[in-house]
Amino acid sequence: MTSLRDAAMNSKAWPFEEARAVLKRFGGKDPKKGHALFETGYGPSGLPHIGTFGEVARTTMIRRAFEIICDIPTRLICFSDDVDGMRKVPENVPQQEMLKANLQRPLTSVPDPFGEYESFGAHNNAMLRRFLDTFGFEYEFISATDFYKSGRFDDTLKLAAERYEQIMEIMLASLREERQQTYSCFLPIHPETGRVLYVPMKHVDKANHTITFDDEDGREWTLPVTGGHVKLQWKPDFGARWAALDVDFEMYGKDHSTNTPIYDGICEVLGGRKPNHFTYELFLDEHGQKISKSKGNGLTIDEWLTYAASESLSYFMYQKPKTAKRLWWDVIPRAVDEYHQQLKAFPDQTVEQQVSNPVFHIHDGKPPESKMVVSFGMLLNLASVAGAKDAKGLWGFIRRYAPEASPETHPDLDAAAGYAVRYFADKIAPTRVFRLPSDTERAAMEDLVARLKAWDGGLDDEALQSMVFAVGKEHGFEPLRDWFKALYEVLLGASDGPRFGGFIALYGVEETVALIEKALAGGLVSG
């Protein structure tokens, strides 16, 4: 029998592929620092969005995969670049005028517009940490403000002053000529205004590790590069952080990919070894545009969790990380159902199949049992005809279909029923458009009603599906999908729907007869 480690070492699942690459980095030896360091970076310029969750979740999947294939300890650092100057005011937060008055100040020096924390950066960091903790991520949090001010970054910053020309050579090659004239990798923080200054350097003192510059008013200043008086531009900061922390792995979005040679080069100039990278594709909103923290487009973490459990979000993040994906309301039901399909398959799989199953990576190799005896898609359709206001309103139907199920024994199904009612009310009900059947469709539906009234086959969804299938065939529907599409549009007000036999089994034969008769009488269109 194949061992878990052997299966993992040969798995084509992307977390194991990345984990093996990190292991190869060490060349069969334990790292000098005694552990493998995974990092994820965060720019707290706006409220955390769902892409941030994806980055931490995916990095955690690779970290856990690494722990399976070897015995080297691991750490995960979540680094917040909160010394970054606030360049624009996010559109989705209060006190816009106050924030405008604080533009260009480090985020941890900007007052919190929500009035809850000592700064806007601290607020956004707290939002990030709250959500990381909610999902049970194991991580160490580092604030760039603390990193710069505490002295932990000082040795690397001194080296940056000593190797200023080499860093500038890398940076200037990537800039337009106009930008080259004023660019410096060092950004002084003005001693009086507290603003991050984008000014050229007059002198960089390699021996004393200071910089000299003129501020916007033409006054000359000299500041040490250490102790939080200066920050690095964000691209040099990326590479310098890798060198200072000795990072082994970091993933980031495709929008960073062209900067990878810059990050790597600066890391190496500052005495570090460039980490392994993983570039993921971006999430898109309903219009195919990149989601943005500052715009607040796309779904938020809380919005997803209003309509589905967190595991479905993890499943969505696992799927094809190198393919751009729409992150909009309509992806939630499919993610829920596919997640539970994988959970149900897991116990009967070989170890080789299990390590390639998404739920293995979502649940650190120990996925729970799925109790979803009714799919989320089916619950949505049940909600559409049952008039239920909460999960309790669906349980009468569920119990008849699955007598062994109850909210106590099937908590995931109970939660899904509540999510389905909410999702239907908010996202489906407002968009439904019912229509009357054509003459051919009416004849077929009348035939279906007659057969259902005579039905004595119980609630066997396969038998019911075969009967519905036969009706469509006998009434000349070609392709047969047109028959099912007609049922959905006339009865559910949508062009797509569930396996109709399963729907009848869940909703009930008599209830389905009443629904069809109401639709044929025009009651759904007028209602």
Image: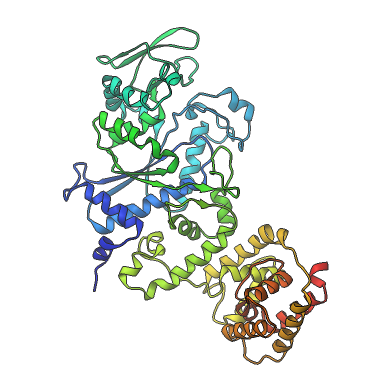
- Choose between 522 and 37: the one closer to the eye: 522
Q: Quadrant of the N terminus?
A: bottom left
- Choose between 81 and 481: the one closer to the eye: 481
| Residue at screen point 65% across, 92% down | 456
> Percent from the top left, x then y, of residue 121?
49, 33
Residue 88 falls in image quadrant: top right
Q: Is residue 470 left or right of residue 212?
A: right
Q: Is residue 508 left or right of residue 524?
A: left
| Residue at screen point 39% across, 37% down | 258
> Percent from the top left, x then y, of residue 107?
49, 29
> Percent from the top left, x then y, of residue 31?
20, 45
Q: Is residue 430 left or right of residue 191?
A: right
| Residue at screen point 24% across, 46% down | 35
Q: Is residue 483 left or right of residue 336?
A: right
On screen, residue 210 above or below 106: above
Q: Quadrant of the C terminus?
A: bottom right
> Percent from the top left, x then y, of residue 437?
77, 74
Q: How many marks?
A: 0
